[in-house]
Every structure is written in structure tokens, then in C-alpha cells.
Image: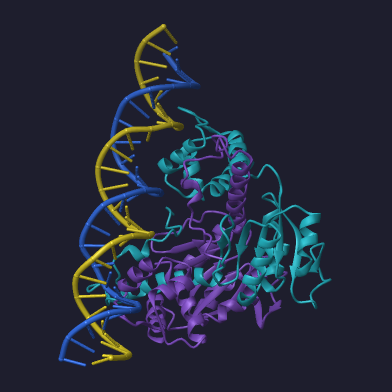
Chain colours: A purple, B cyan, C yellow, D blue
Amino acid sequence: MSRLPEYLRALHVLADAGHETVSSEGLANAAGVNSAKLRKDLSHLGSYGTRGVGYDVALLVDQISSVLGLTQCRTVALVGVGNLGHALAGYDGFANRGFRIAALLDADRSRVGEEINGLVVRHVDELPQIVAEESISIGVIATPAPAAQAVADQLVAVGVTSILNFAPCVLSVPDGVDVRKVDLAIELQILSFHEHRKASLTALPATGGSALTALPGGLAATDTQEAIGT
Amino acid sequence: MSRLPEYLRALHVLADAGHETVSSEGLANAAGVNSAKLRKDLSHLGSYGTRGVGYDVALLVDQISSVLGLTQCRTVALVGVGNLGHALAGYDGFANRGFRIAALLDADRSRVGEEINGLVVRHVDELPQIVAEESISIGVIATPAPAAQAVADQLVAVGVTSILNFAPCVLSVPDGVDVRKVDLAIELQILSFHEHRKASLTALPATGGSALTALPGGLAATDTQEAIGT
DNA sequence: AGGTGTTTGTGAAGGGGTGCACAAATCGCG
DNA sequence: CGCGATTTGTGCACCCCTTCACAAACACCT
């Protein structure tokens, strides 16, 4: 599931701290989830824990890495070297976790040739040659919204089947292509909603707020990382 | 719910395109969701559609903006002016959607004084004064993981109750504080998983792959924006 | 004014994830 | 060798979300 990467990160932290084994509860705390949920998740990949002891950290890292397909270093092509793309190109969090940015692309020819973090920006039309040179497995779109669909089409055309989209728009792609979307403004808006809700509740503690702010209750239950101890 | 911001974005696009009303199916397509789900979501905020016609775009924008608490421009403080923080500071997608970055902070004194996008970087210890000057409603953490918890504690101490965390770690905060986490590497790892799964399935079409790659099937069902038409 | 087509709002069914609670299994120690 | 402590793996119940399907309501046309 989508929680495996979080487990993997927590496991790396534990490994660096010298732990050789972890209990489900220890790892669950480090990853911010319920321990039963974690055990159920791990049991889905084949039960590699020892009862009474816990899980072997190194073994579990190998297991999860294997399931996530991180045994091979995956190469990504980043399209759109604007504000956000520039930062992503220099973000060291990718290289540390098994991803290599192999190409930077932009549709603006005035940016082509610019060197960022040791990579030269190339024009997006060179995509076919770039895919031929490097085996690109993931495409990242960091363009403005109006350009995103065209870029996605180009990526799909050259055989990319996994796309991470930072542009605030919905992409249409054929079956078999996976798209994940990250919209930074939406994250802020969700926080704004919670902020607004909290303000309304404290202002009207008795009534519970207006019909608009005191919604059925399910609204507050997003997959936020909720308060965890102190 | 967490889908309201997506509806709002789609509505703005439709409004700019000149549409005055939208059917639930039209808006659902633009937002990438099921039409019944959208209707149920909107009905939770008080039924402002007209049967046989659809929803009034302008009215719905006001409604959702009000529920999300976007009627007032929310100010955010950004802590950590590294690679990612630098990009976030210059990201125009925030200002366009009702958010104003009011302060840039960093723990590294060598970065203090630097001017980014018209704002001067100040030291993180000045947080109390900054909160006194501006009414900060959201804190954004873009620091390395080891520093994130300390920054979160400082934000909570000065009264910030909503935090957007880009650092790859779990934050401990008291009850009443909302934390949303965005981990760019995790997004890539989830795509890597899907890529790995697709590769295994095509390599072994008959058997369905090994026990590790052919998991119960629920693994593929994350909240990805799945393929939508062509 | 009445009929017709379209669209909303919602009841009901189905599925999936979540968490509790407990049996099974393993280790360490007497 | 046996016993207790600890921890995993999982059956079960619960709840929420999703989706279908349909009745009610509205606008438009004749």
C-alpha cells in the first residue's frame, strides 16, 4: 500500500540508530500508524517477523525495497524548470532514496542550455532521444497547468507509464498509466479548512457552529497526520 | 472533505471559461471524480443546485470558499529556506489561491538577511515577534528532517495550530494542532511500486508474478488519479 | 397549462479499510 | 525441561466511503 514508503523511511532511521530488530509497536510509532495496521500490512508481504522478538530491520528494509521496486535505481525525467522544477532538480531527498534525476526538460527555449546541479536543461522535444539514452521510468511534470496535458501526452507517447504531476490540473492519460498528483495549494487549503473549523467551534462552543461549519463530522477525518502524543 | 479544494480549482477554470452553470457531471469530469460523489459532497454543504439546470458557478465558488475559510486571505510563515523552501517562497501558485507568505525564516544565520521574492529572511528565533506583527495562521516546514521537530515545537509555542510539513519525518504535536505531510520522495516510491508491479505482470502474464509482487490486489488501489478517458 | 427531458438529491447495497482482542509461537530463565 | 513474558499473525465486528439507481423537482417547449 501507500504506507510502505513511510515504513521504509522509519526503518532507515532505526537502522541508522543501531537497532537490529523492531517490534511492531516501535515501528508503528516511528511511522505514525496503528501497530495492528502495521502488522497486517507487513503480513501481506509474507510474514518476516519472529514472535516474541519482532522484525529484523535489515531484512525488512530489503523486503520493502524489493516490493517497491527500489532494488534498481530508478531514473526520472523532470519537465518544467520553473520555480518548483528548479528546486526539485536540486532536492537531495531524491538521490538519497534511490532516485536519479537523469534529464531536465523545458518547453521554453530560453531556458535550454542552462545548467542546474550538473545537468543541462534540454528542450522537451528531445524527449524521444533522451528516453533512448537513459531508461526513464518516471516522469515529473512541474510546468504551469496549461502546459501539463501536452507534456503528459508527450511522456506517454515515448513510453513513460508513471507520472508525478505538480501542475494544478487533472490529466487525461490512457489505461495503464499511473498519475499521482501533488498540489501544494490544495494542502494549504485543507489546512485552512481545519483552521476555519477550529475558529468557528471555539467561537460558538454551545451551538457547534453554523450548518456550514459543523458538517457531519466526516469532514475532519482526512488522512492528516493527527496529533500524536507530546 | 479534502476534495473541496479540487472542486474549487475546477470551478475557477470553468468560471474563467465563461460558464455560469455546471452540471454535476461536468464538474465531476473537471475535478476527476464520480458525479454521484460530487453531488453528495455538495449536498453536505446545503444543496445549492437547481434540478434540471445544475449549479451556479459563482455561487458555488463563494460557498466552497466560505467553507474552506478562504474569505480571508490567510498568511503563512515558511521555515527553512533551503532548496525546497526557496522554491516555495517564489511559487506563485500560493498567492493566486488566497495565501500570502508573510515571513521567511531559517535557523542558519548565514542565510538571515537574504532577500527572496521581496521578503527578507529572518532568524527562526524571531518567531514570537513575527507572529505579533502578522497574524500567522499556517506554518510551513521545509527544513531538513532533524530540525523539523524543533521548528514544529516553536511554531506550536507561538500559537500556530496548522502545519504543512515537507520534512521526511513524523511530527509530534499536541491535540488541536493539525499537521499535513508532503513527502516528495514517497510519491516517487509509490510510483516506483506501480511501475515494478506493472513490469512483473507483463513479464509473467500467466502466473501473475511471485507472491511478493502479486499482492492481494488492494495494494494497487491507492488514491491515485487513475486513468481517465483519453 | 401540460407534457417531456434533464438534473439534483438521496436511499440502499456493496466493498474496503481499521482496530480490537485473542490464539499461536518464540525466547529466555530458572 | 518447563514456564512465563513478549510479540506476531489474524478472525471478527464495525464504520465509513463509494457507487448505483431512482424518485422528486425544475425548465423548456408546444
Q: Please indicate, yes or no, whether residue B16 appears anywhere in the rendered image.
A: yes
Quadrant including the C terminus of chain B: bottom left
Residue B83 vs A198, above or below: the answer is below
Residue B67 image-quadrant placement: top right
Q: Position of residue A153 (x, y in %)?
A: 51, 62
Residue B127 image-quadrant placement: bottom right
Residue A73 vs B67, above or below: the answer is below
Q: Position of residue B91 (x, y in %)?
A: 69, 61
Q: Is residue A113 left or right of residue D24?
A: right
Q: Position of residue C26 (x, y in %)?
A: 26, 85
Residue at the image position 44 percent from the left and 75 percent from the top: A27
Residue at the image position 22 percent from the left and 73 percent from the top: B206
Residue at the image position 69 percent from the left and 57 percent from the top: B159
Q: Is residue A130 left or right of residue A122?
A: left
Most distant residue in the right direction: B113
Q: Is residue C2 left or right of residue A103?
A: left
Residue A188 image-quadrant placement: bottom right
Residue A151 vs D4, above or below: the answer is above
Q: How many tags in the picture?
A: 0
Q: Position of residue C3 (x, y in %)?
A: 34, 15
Q: Nearer the viewer, residue C19 or B2?
A: C19
